[in-house]
Amino acid sequence: MTRSILVTGATGFIGSRLVEKLVEKEHNVTSLIRKGKHSHPKSRKIIGDLTDSNLDISIEKIDCVFHLASHTPLEKNKKILEKVNLGGTKNLFNQIKDKTKSIIYISGLGVYGDPGEGIVDESFPYNPTTDFVKIRLDAQKFLEKNCKDVGINFSVIHFGDVYGTRGWFYEFLIKRLLKHTFRLPKNGNYYKGFVHIEDAVGSMVSVLENNLKNESYIVADSSPAKFREFVDFTADQIRVKHPGNVPVFLAKAVIGGDLIKLLMTSMKVSNKKISQIYQFKFPSYRDGIPNVISELKSKRLLK
Ligand SMILES: NC(=O)c1ccc[n+]([C@@H]2O[C@H](COP(=O)([O-])OP(=O)(O)OC[C@H]3O[C@@H](n4cnc5c(N)ncnc54)[C@H](OP(=O)(O)O)[C@@H]3O)[C@@H](O)[C@H]2O)c1
């Protein structure tokens, strides 16, 4: 069944791959992109910035909006985060509230805070501990409430750390490992949930195509791993030395306290719920990283 879909954040790491997949599946895709940016040639484009009070999403009825546009947690200025991630979400909602049947909002595992030893699933309470995550949760709650009031289906996906040929994996890990400038705070001794970009996109499409209403999903692969293991495995794959450590106070000074808190929070998650509708292609980073490395090589981004 062909659906009409709007994607925000369509030029980003995950959004661009999502648009590609939706086009491949013959859905009618519209990309919201900022001036001067490009998106998939087979998707319709609407130029606009979510923070612009004159934002005009001139679109007929749509089946679903995937809302991915966001500042990254690298942004330290709370006012900017509020303007884009919360204000931008409200602005978007006002434009689409009488046009769409459903909204799928993309978020991260940070909403669960510091859960301790247990395995986190969708029944876990939210407990945000950084400004970035608090603002992101405010945006989620705004959408949840307002969608309910006007009868729009709302679902949220909480991604683990998504790795692929763009984004943090390539820009911060691969490039710095190659230059021998990557360092691990606290020896990388904390559990993370990882997800290959293909599985991130595949699970989003499954949520869309299964027509699920008012649900939340955790999307991470089946093998929670310590960050140190993930990084050392990546280093082995590109044949560079395992990285050393950096004191936490120094890491905070360089990339910000909130981001370091998000990075160093140990969390094991269950992907049982999403696995009922989506079968992971890369159930472990040990399957997924070699695939990304060979894609980087074929794109000549890595020798
Ligand atoms: N990557 C991960 O590991 C991960 C993990 C968990 C959750 N997530 C969430 O998944 C979503 C997508 O992540 P990503 O890695 O694809 O992010 P990304 O590569 O940084 O892309 C962000 C996208 O948002 C757009 N954007 C930013 N501000 C905007 C504004 N004011 N108006 C319109 N568009 C704006 C950017 O457009 P420009 O190209 O014009 O800058 C870009 O298309 C985000 O919500 C992110 O927090 C990501």
Image (cartoon, grey):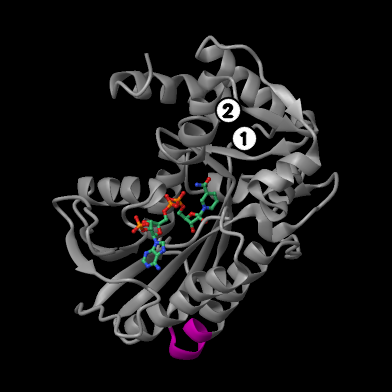
Badge 1 amino acid: Ser
Badge 2 amino acid: Ser
Q: Position of residue 105 (x, y in %)?
A: 48, 65
Question: Residue 176's quadrant in the figure?
Answer: top right
What residue is drawn where x is 35% and y is 79%? 52
Of 144 and 133, the residue lying toward us? 133
Residue on which disc 2 sits: 284
Classify 195 as above or below 284. Answer: below
Classify 205 as above or below 45. Answer: above
Q: Is the stretch drawn in magenta largely helix, strand or loop? A: helix
111 falls in the magenta region:
no
Task: Decide: few, some or many residues near mark 2? Use Cα within 10 Å; few <14, some 14-19, many ≥20.
Answer: some
Marks 2/1: CA distance? 6 Å
Of 247 and 88, the residue lying toward us? 247
Tag 2's secondary structure? loop
Residue on which disc 1 sits: 222
Q: Is residue 83 left or right of residue 48?
A: right
| Contact check, label 2 and label 1, Cβ < 8 Å | yes
Question: Residue 236's quadrant in the figure?
Answer: top right
In magenta, the rendered stretch is 146-151
Residue positioned most to the right: 117
Residue positioned most to the bottom: 149
| Image quadrant where one finds the C terminus | top left
| Image quadrant where one finds the N terminus | bottom left
Q: Position of residue 126 (x, y in %)?
A: 73, 65
Q: Is residue 153 left or right of residue 252?
A: left
Of 41 and 173, the residue lying toward us? 173
Q: Position of residue 220 (x, y in %)?
A: 58, 42
Classify 204 as above or below 179. Answer: below
